Amino acid sequence: MLDYPSLEALAAVVREGSFERAAQALHVTPSAISQRVKLLEERLGRVLVLRGQPCAATEAGRQLCRHVEQVGLLEHGLRQALPGVLPEPDAGERATLRVAVNADSLGGWFMEAARRFTEGGTELLDISLDDQDHTAQWLRSGEVLAAVTATPKPVQGCNSVALGHMAYVAAASPAYVQRHFAKGVDQQSLAHAPVLVFNQKDLLQKQWLEQHFGAGLKPPRHWFPATQAFIDAGLAGIGWGMHPVELVAPHLASGTLVALRPDATLDVALHWQHVRVALPALQRLTQDVCAAAQAIQRVPGA
């Protein structure tokens, strides 16, 4: 039988990043937290926490933390369905759902899903950011219970739901277009015009170039690893980039951003994958995500 006070101490250390903050969150002393984690490690015969700044869970520690989170969510659902069956948690303690989302979705349609979810219950959200081609890995490692991902094939133990296609347009400011593409958008001009890139995982610009102009183009790159900063860099004339149509539609309409090829959007299919566990909060979040994703349910290329 697992010792749940010790498991809660482990989860708090990993969540808060230190034994001291975990102690504050659980209203006990740091030595009590340390003792609980040490006893749990001794009982299981393996290291569960890598001590550092911040502390991090080992693979075994992550599995136990995931178990604690799921138990907490199940108990939360049971309290709602059968009041009085379980004691109420300490003040300030709430069930938390850990989710991985790509930055452009979080900056756009996913915020509506978060609004619906938080208005409909008391659970908290813990959002991790990653590229849509990499968020599925967070599910495989057990670090999250659900993810917005470009991977359609379900991760083992998960369900996959198609959300729609997020459209991207290659765009830049009018001044930038005049400066770099006065003679047209072609291989020669694109090879020298600086491009905006979100981070090393961002391949959208490369994919668009290969799709419409062939492989081999390697323009100079500016790095802007934040959704709004990426858009602002385009508006400022720093470079061209692949912008989510959902987020820059007003700028395209007003002319502050100009599409390099209006007829050539890049459509990225998104999916919602979540673990196959009957968690009421996760089921509700799934409904809210699917409802909010109607904003990107469009015909590719339309």
Image (cartoon, helix red, strand yellow):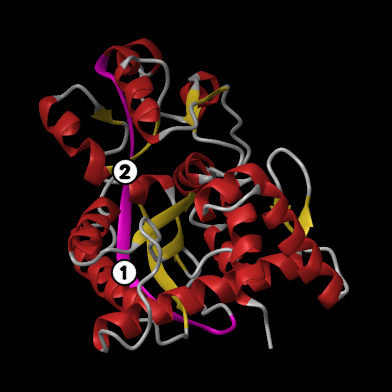
Image coords of residue 264 (percent x, y): 32, 46
Q: Where, by quadrant of the figure, is residue 6 drawn? A: bottom right
Check disc 2: other Cα within 10 Å, few if <14, some if 14-19, many if 20+.
Answer: some
- Relative depth, front residue between 297 and 103: 103
Q: Which residue is mark 2?
A: 107
176 with respect to 158 (left or right): left
Q: Which residues are magenta?
A: 156-174
- Relative depth, front residue between 276 and 262: 276
Say which label, 1 or 2, has the lower sequence index.
Answer: 2
* Image quarter in which the N terminus is found: bottom right
What amino acid type should be assigned to the residue bearing mark 2?
A: Gly
* Image quarter in which the C terminus is found: bottom left
Q: Where, by quadrant of the figure, is residue 49 drawn? A: bottom right
> Is residue 120 highlighted in magenta?
no
Instruction: Say which mark, if any, is on residue 163.
Output: 1
Front of the two marks 1 and 2: 2
190 with respect to 170 (left or right): right
Check disc 1: other Cα within 10 Å, few if <14, some if 14-19, many if 20+.
Answer: many
Asked if 48 appears above or below 178 in the picture, the reply is below
Instruction: Say which mark, if any, is on residue 85.
Output: none
Asked if 44 appears above or below 54 in the picture, the reply is below
